Structure formats: C-alpha cells, structure tokens
Image (tube, rainbow, N blue to C red):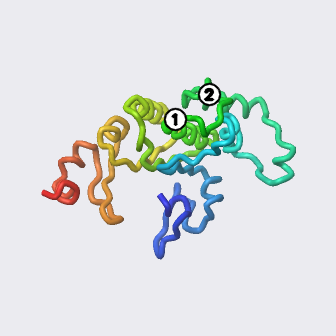
Amino acid sequence: MDVITGKTRPSHGKAWFGETLDLTKMTEVQIAQAGIGRKFQKPTVFEALSVFENLELAQKTDKSVWASLRARLSGEQQDRIAEVLETIRLTSSMHRPAGLLSHGQKQFLEIGMLLVQDPQLLLLDEPVAGMTDAETEFTAELFKSLAGKHSLMVVEHDMGFVGSIADHVTVLHQGSVLAEGSLNDVQADERVIEVYLGR
C-alpha cells in the first residue's frame, strides 16, 4: 500500500494504475488526485472538528489559502456529504466532535472522508481492527454496497471478515504473492498452510 500511495519509493520496478499512470513517478498528492484513497489502520480524523466538518475538509476542492478563505459549500457538495453521512450511518452525529465518536464510528468517518473524494480505488488497512462484532458486520455490508462503484483493496487478518467481503484473495509472504483465488482455495493451499499454520 505504501508504494501504491507514494509513501514509500521502490528501489526498482513500477506500480501501474490503469494502463497509463506509473505511480512511482507521482507524488502522494498526485496519486490521491488520480483517484486512489487510503485508510490507515488507526483512524486519523480531526477530533476537534465535527463529523460534518471532517467530511467537508476531505472533499476534493482547491486547498489554497485564498480559495479556503472564500470557500462556501455548493448544494451539490452538501448533498454529497449528506449522502455519505447516510452511507456511513453518522447522520445523527454530524454535528458531534469527531473526538467523541467510538473507535468504530471514527473508522466509518475516515471511510466517509475517502468516499467524499469519490476515488476509483480504496486501500483499506485492517479496517475492522478493534471493532465490535456489530461494527464489523456493518463494515462488511458497507464494503459490499460499494461494489461496482469503487474497487477496494483490503489488508486484513480476520479471515471471517475477509470471507464475508472478498471475491478474490491474495496471500503475500515476505513481499511476494504466495497464493491467489477464492478464500476456500487459498485456505486449502499447502504453501499457505505451511507458512501461516506451520504444518
């Protein structure tokens, strides 16, 4: 994920997004503007700001000083925020400071902050870590509802969760692909069993 988002530069090789964009030649900002959004394992929200303000700040807009001083939300932008609030089930908390949200709600808010940017690809690092069973179940529903609108790449160790959302699973070991396919195929792969279960 770090190479895809430009956080880490590879010593060699390329990372292609679509057929024309070599991500290794782009800055983190350019990569985000190209339609790739990332959610880290630990939620990173602006805790002193309201849920609504977090979503407002996350929108794709001109972030220059003068543009920010003159900024007013258009009706379309307000509608988009309202739609995302409903999607992440935080409409009733829209005026609440983000710092007062539960861990799971902060995770949902951060996912919402990606969604208002309308990325083609969402990279999600252990999105259900620390969540309750109900929050994990909602996250699975949320991810399935995004199918067809966005591509999702999820790094996750909870195989129950992976099984509830994934069409295709890739197992990595020391930076290389160990196995790919359905979850059942991957779990039955002898190399995966040997490496991860020590048999």
Quick one: SS at disc 1? loop
Position above or below: 129 against 143: below
Helix, strand or loop under label 2: helix
From this viewpoint, which residue is outermost toward the top? 92
Q: Position of residue 107 (x, y in %)?
A: 51, 40
Residue type highlighted by circle 2? Ser
Give the camera-side residue of 67 and 106: 106
In the picture, the quarter occupied by the C terminus is: bottom left
Image-quadrant location for residue 29: bottom right
Residue count near mark 1 (Cα–Cα under 10 Å), binned few <14, some 14–19, many ≥20:
few
Q: Amino acid at mark 1?
A: Ser
Residue 10 percent location from the top left of the image: 48, 71
Q: Which mark is residue 93?
A: 2
Viewer-side residue, 132 vs 19: 132
On the image, the x and y values in percent for residue 145 come to 47, 31
Q: Residue furthest front?
A: 100
Q: Earlier in the sequence, mark 1 or mark 2?
A: 2
Residue found at x 52% / y 35%:
102
Image side of residue 87 versus residue 183, left or right = right
Q: Which residue is mark 1?
A: 102
Q: Nearer the viewer, mark 1 or mark 2?
A: 1
Instruction: Give me the residue at 56% from left, 42% from top.
Output: 110
* Residue projecting furthest to the bottom: 11
Circles 1, 2 touching at the beta carbon (< 8 Å): no
**Which residue occupies 59% across, 39% down?**
115
- In this rendering, the count of numbered labels is 2
Question: Which residue: 19% across, 52% down?
Answer: 189
| Residue 25 pos. (x, y %) | 59, 68
